[in-house]
Structure formats: C-alpha cells, structure tokens
Image (cartoon, rainbow, N blue to C red):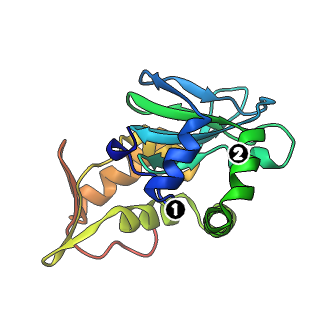
C-alpha cells in the first residue's frame, strides 16, 4: 500500500508505521476538512490531491494562506491544544490519512528524525506567514499582486510564464483584496503591454512597473 504514496519527511518504513494508526478516506472536491475555530484533534497526511488553507470572516471574505499537495500534511498545530486557526478545503478529490493527535504524539516519540523535520517545516511555514503579514502591512494591493505574479512565474526566454494561472477571485483571496481591484489592475497591465492573459497561461512580457 505504501509503495503508491509518498509523504515528505517520511521514509517508506515510517510511512507504513504511520498508516497503521491512520484512517484513510477519500474527500470530494470542495469539501471542508477543517473549519477555522473547530476543536479537533487530528493530523492529516495528503496521499493524493490538493487542498487550500484559508481564513474567512462572517461576511464570506477570504484570504488564502497557501496550497498543499500530495506528500504534504496539515493539522499538526493540534499538538498544542486549542481551536483550529484556519480552514482547509479540498481543491480536487483528495485521499487523506487522518491520524489522531494521541497516536501522532506516540509516532513522534518513536520517530525522532521525523520530529526534527516537522519542527523545520513549522519554522518554514512561520517564516512564510511572517512574510505574508509584512506584505499585507507594508505593500499596497498592486505591490502584493505584482509580487505574487513574479513568485508564480517561471523564466522562458525574455519572458516569464505562469502555466496554471489563478482566477481573478483566487488572486484576490491570495493577496487580501476584492476581485474587482484585481480585474482593474490586470486590465491596465494588459493594455500597457506588461501582461498577456489567456485561459492557458499568463505571460509577463516585460518588467512590471514599480507602482500602479
């Protein structure tokens, strides 16, 4: 069974040990696995599929924290008792291994190498969140959108390509603004010759302006 799956930071024997205590389930697309504010006690390992981690207010406005795919895991902050700090939604059909926090603690005790890697991963996530908070506080909407475009793009000759472009609503969720604002900025960047947008990709044709 474990030959079909890969979890980052776990070798095949560790994965087999972890799955012995796990409940494996398939979740359809657009299923909320964790609700912000829930009092739950489990860690989830993504065997296949992709999820979105996000925050939302009572008005339905969202800010996306990040996306996780096969081989990654979430919910490990349940090691410290308290409510869930974010929601998790499946972006496609996902197969998840759910491990109760009591079993996860025992797993960490018996697999100290993984425990060390888990700490490293938590530090990286904390740094990413700090960077996002800095951007929200110090950059305007255009600055945040410009930075996200450049982070998603890959070099191709003199241009930069985003192979799987987000929708305007997804861009808005990632940078904490309205879809209308993203639409206005994109329209100006396209008319100015900075961007070329199609259903397949977004092409950054020349260096984006410093301000909008």
Along the line of sight, which residue is nearer the eye, 196 or 200?
A: 200
Give left or right: position of 161 versus 104: left
Which quarter of the rendered picture does the N terminus lie within? top left
Q: Residue at x 58, y 63 (%)?
A: 140
Q: Is residue 32 above or below residue 82?
A: above
* Circle nearer the N terminus (2, 1): 1
Residue drawn at (26%, 69%) of the image: 154
Graded by Cα atoms within 10 Å as few (under 14), some (14 to 19) or many (20 or more), the crowding at tag 2 reads: many
Using the image as rendered, state which of residue 22 and residue 147 is in the foreground.
22
Quarter of the figure with residue 98:
top right
Return the residue nearer the eye: 14 or 166: 14
Q: In the shown orientation, is residue 104 left or right of residue 145? A: right
Quarter of the picture containing the C terminus is bottom left
Q: Which residue is mark 1?
A: 9
Q: Position of residue 74 (x, y in %)?
A: 60, 45
- The answer to the question of whether label 2 and label 1 lie on touching residues, with beta carbons closer than 8 A, is no
> Helix or strand or loop: what does disc 2 sit on?
helix
Q: Quadrant of residue 153?
A: bottom left
Residue 135: image location, x then y, percent: 61, 66
Q: Residues within 10 Å of mark 1 (few under 14, many from 20)?
A: some
Q: Is residue 134 visible?
A: no
Residue name at image x 44 percent, y 62 percent: 148
- Residue 67 x/y as whole percent: 48, 48
Inter-mark Cα distance, 2 to 1: 14 Å
Residue 186 position (above or below residue 133):
above
Horizontal relation, residue 207 to residue 140: left or right: left
Q: Residue furthest right?
A: 81
Residue identified by numbered label 2 = 104
């Amino acid at each position: 069974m474990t030959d079909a799956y890969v979890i980052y930071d776990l070798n095949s024997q560790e994965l087999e040990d972890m799955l012995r205590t796990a409940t494996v389930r398939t979740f359809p697309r657009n299923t909320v696995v964790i609700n912000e504010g829930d009092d739950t006690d489990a860690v989830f390992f993504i065997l296949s599929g992709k999820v979105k981690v996000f925050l939302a207010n009572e008005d339905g406005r969202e800010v996306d924290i990040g996306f996780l795919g096969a081989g990654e895991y979430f919910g490990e902050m349940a090691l410290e008792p308290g409510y869930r700090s974010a929601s998790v939604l499946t972006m496609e059909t996902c197969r998840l291994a759910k491990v109760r926090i009591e079993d996860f603690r025992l797993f960490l005790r018996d697999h100290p190498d993984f425990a060390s890697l888990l700490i490293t991963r938590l530090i990286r996530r904390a740094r990413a969140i700090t960077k996002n908070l800095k951007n929200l506080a110090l950059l305007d909407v255009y600055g945040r959108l410009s930075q996200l475009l450049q982070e998603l793009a890959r070099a191709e000759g003199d241009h930069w390509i985003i192979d799987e472009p987000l929708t305007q609503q997804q861009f808005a969720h990632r940078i904490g603004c309205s879809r209308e604002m993203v639409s206005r900025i994109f329209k100006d960047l396209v008319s100015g010759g900075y961007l070329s947008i199609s259903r397949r990709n977004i092409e950054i044709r020349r260096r984006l302006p410093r301000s909008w």
